[in-house]
Image: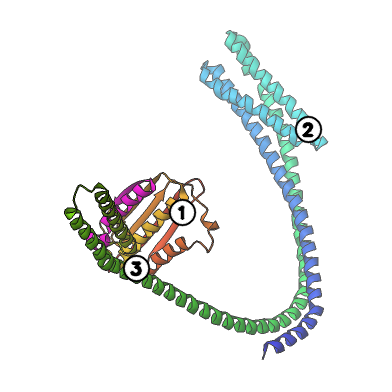
């Protein structure tokens, strides 16, 4: 079946689905409405249950605090030990806190607020009775505090407090029970409604699924066509990328070979010519009469010019193909490179270079990486201090160039930045990984990890 035929088939099925889908949506909306209504009623009942439970817990805490206060008071009265007053004082403070909490809870219920008022008065009387006994004990009035202690006044107060508290607890329990009944009722109504609507919704949904299954088959075939096309395009992209990468590596290698050829030609041909000219000037200088100062001055100037040309030739050769790299090794070549760059650019460059075992091509990659990084620093970074490190590890070598310059945003670097792109391509062609970390005002770190030859 072609893509066009699939599209026509899809349109026919869509018209059929247009009749069954509204029924399924309507059933779903009704189901959601029933569920939300039941949920709201259940939520209100749960909140009421929670409120009742918390109120009951608060009343129990009040009773416990009163018992703790009475225990501490009686301990002090009987022993005179001040340590018993510490739990008493804490319990009194807790009692006041519990009373405030209960008062806030009963504000919405006038009947229970009135009952709580009775409980609060009894608690105040009990606290006053205990405080009076303690004051008499501290004053040394033995007969008075013992009289209060052994009478039934305290017991009556506590019995009244328990009675009032249990009335409030029973009312809270009734509210909890009523909330439970509401939850059960809401659940039952929700079950009936959900079962009815679900039956209708399932019927409509079954009709919808039949059409959706057909559409899924059409979509699956379309996805398969698109997947094959995507794989074909990805294959073309991978082939083109690999071809471009190979071309870039080839051009880079051709460039290095051409540099080596030019370096050899300059060294062999131009070097020989300049050296011969310098020797000829030396012979002429030895045979010319020293009485002709103008000629001697010209010969001296010519000698200096030849020396400058030889030095320029040497610098060009080193830039094209560093002889120190093949003759002295990577560490020494980098030492020479950084020293000369520091003198030329006026930048303080520190080095920490370890001896590493790399192939000749990889050593050249490291050398060019450091050379390009130093060139970028002198052009753009406005740095005053640079650190170049080469560290040897069991399986790889790390190369880092860090500066304290202006820095930049790596994400803003465009495709026209051929220097960074060339550095990255060199490192990746050698099987390594290049990382550039920078931020405006915080310098730049160029870091490369290169594998060792096996």
Q: Is residue 328 magenta?
A: yes
Location of mark 3 (residue): 259
Q: Locate residue 259, reporting x and y percent.
A: 34, 68
Q: Secondary structure at mark 1?
A: strand
Q: Marks 1/2: CA distance?
A: 73 Å
Q: Is residue 419 magenta?
A: no
Count residues near mark 3 (Cα–Cα under 10 Å), then give few for <14, some for 14-19, many for 20+.
some
Q: Residue at x 51, y 51 (%)?
A: 408
Q: Locate residue 7, reporting x and y percent.
A: 72, 85
Mark 2 and mark 3 in contact (Cβ < 8 Å)? no
- Look at the image and name its color scheme: rainbow
The kind of secondary structure the magenta stretch mainly shows is helix
Tag 3 or tag 1, which sits nearer the N-term? 3
Residue 146, picture quadrant: top right
Location of mark 1 (residue): 437
Left or right of 190, for residue 149: left
Q: Residue at x 64, y 34 (%)?
A: 61
Give the foreground label among 1 and 2: 1
Which residues are drawn in magenta? 323-352
* Residue 261 against residue 295 in the figure, above or below: below
Left or right of 197, for residue 234: left
Tag 2 or tag 3, which sits nearer the N-term? 2
Q: Marks 3/2: CA distance?
A: 104 Å
Location of mark 2 (residue): 115
Q: Locate residue 238, reporting x and y percent.
A: 49, 77
Camera-nearest residue between 316 and 73: 316
Camera-nearest residue between 420 and 356: 420
* Residue 21 against residue 160 in the figure, above or below: below
Camera-nearest residue between 100 and 282: 282
């Amino acid at each position: 079946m072609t893509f066009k035929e699939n599209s026509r088939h899809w349109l026919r099925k869509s018209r059929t689905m247009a009749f069954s889908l509204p029924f399924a949506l309507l059933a779903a909306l009704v189901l959601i409405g029933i569920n939300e209504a039941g949920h709201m009623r259940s939520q209100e009942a749960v909140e009421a249950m929670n409120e009742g439970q918390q109120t009951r817990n608060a009343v129990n805490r009040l009773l416990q605090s009163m018992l703790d206060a009475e225990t501490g008071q009686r301990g002090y009265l009987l022993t005179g030990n001040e340590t018993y007053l510490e739990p008493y004082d804490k319990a009194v403070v807790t009692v006041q806190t519990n009373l405030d909490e209960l008062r806030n809870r009963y504000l919405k219920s006038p009947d229970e607020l009135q009952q709580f008022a009775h409980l609060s008065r009894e608690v105040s009387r009990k606290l006053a009775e205990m405080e009076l006994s303690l004051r008499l004990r501290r004053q040394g009035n033995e007969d008075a505090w013992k009289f209060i202690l052994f009478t039934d006044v305290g017991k009556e107060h506590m019995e009244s407090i328990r009675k009032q508290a249990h009335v409030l607890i029973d009312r809270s329990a009734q509210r909890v029970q009523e909330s439970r009944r509401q939850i059960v009722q809401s659940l039952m109504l929700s079950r009936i409604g959900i079962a009815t609507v679900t039956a209708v919704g399932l019927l409509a949904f079954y009709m919808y699924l039949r059409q959706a299954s057909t559409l899924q088959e059409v979509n699956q075939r379309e996805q398969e066509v698109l997947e094959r096309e995507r794989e074909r395009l990805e294959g073309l992209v991978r082939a083109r990328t690999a071809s471009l990468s190979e071309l870039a590596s080839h051009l880079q290698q051709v460039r290095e070979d051409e540099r080596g050829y030019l370096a050899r030609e300059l060294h062999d041909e131009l070097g020989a010519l300049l050296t011969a000219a310098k020797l000829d000037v030396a012979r002429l200088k030895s045979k010319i009469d020293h009485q002709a100062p103008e000629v001697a001055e010209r010969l001296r100037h010519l000698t200096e010019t030849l020396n400058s040309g030889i030095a320029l030739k040497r610098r060009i050769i080193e830039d094209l193909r560093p002889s120190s790299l093949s003759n002295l090794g990577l560490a020494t070549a980098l030492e020479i490179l950084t020293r000369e760059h520091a003198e030329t650019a006026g930048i303080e460059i520190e080095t920490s270079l370890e001896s590493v075992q790399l192939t000749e091509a990889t050593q050249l990659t490291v050398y060019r990486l450091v050379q390009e990084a130093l060139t970028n620093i002198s052009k753009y970074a406005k740095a005053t201090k640079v650190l170049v490190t080469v560290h040897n590890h069991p399986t790889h070598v790390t190369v880092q160039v860090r500066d304290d310059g202006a820095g930049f945003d790596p994400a803003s670097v465009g495709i026209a930045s051929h220097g960074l792109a060339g550095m990255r391509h060199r490192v990746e062609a050698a099987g390594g990984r290049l990382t550039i970390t920078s931020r405006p005002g915080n310098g730049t770190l160029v870091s490369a990890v290169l594998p060792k030859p096996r």
